[in-house]
Amino acid sequence: MNTTNENQDINVEEILNKIQGYFGFVPKIFQVLSEDPHALKVFFDKAEFMMADDALPPLTKEFVSIGAAAALGSPHCLNTHLEVAKEFGASEEQLLLAIIIGASITETTALSKSLRVYHDFKEK
């Protein structure tokens, strides 16, 4: 695969401008990926597809992102999506609830797995 020729056809500045337009800034992940235009384009195309899909309103997508970032313990993603959701009109109560829901899924998953092991252990 000859990525040098492919990279020449990729307009990194245009992609970064679109990202800036959506987030209000360019998150670090896109800044670093811009060093490899092909990788940037692949990652951006996926994100752009999800953001363009109108099956969920933009603010709902941000709440999902906030919950996922909270569940995964990703402070950079969490901060990014909190900022975007706030720009989309989310209240502090909504932001906090999205975090609590996401974090509770992580807690429930850990408890569910652990209790299954415990239950099987008791059955021995």
Image (spheres, helix red, strand yellow):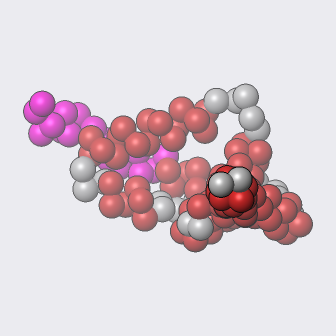
* Coordinates of residue 90 in the picture (x, y in percent): 82, 59
67 left or right of 9 in image = right
Determine if the magenta segment contains residue 2: yes
Nearest the eye: 55 or 73: 73
- Figure disc tally: 0
Residue 52, x across and y down, in percent:
61, 33
For the point 52% across and 38% down, which residue is it? 48
Magenta stretch bounds: 1-18
State yes or no: residue 5 in magenta: yes
Q: Is there any visible trace of residue 110 in the rendered image?
A: yes
Query: Left or right: 31 with respect to 89?
Result: left
Q: What secondary structure prevails in the magenta region?
A: helix
Name the residue rendered at 51%, 55% in the picture. 20
Please state the horizontal and vertical placement of residue 21, each as a whole percent of the image.
55, 51
- Is the N terminus in the top left, top right, bottom left or bottom right quadrant? top left
Q: In this view, does 104 lie above or below 12?
A: below
Q: Position of residue 53 (x, y in %)?
A: 64, 30
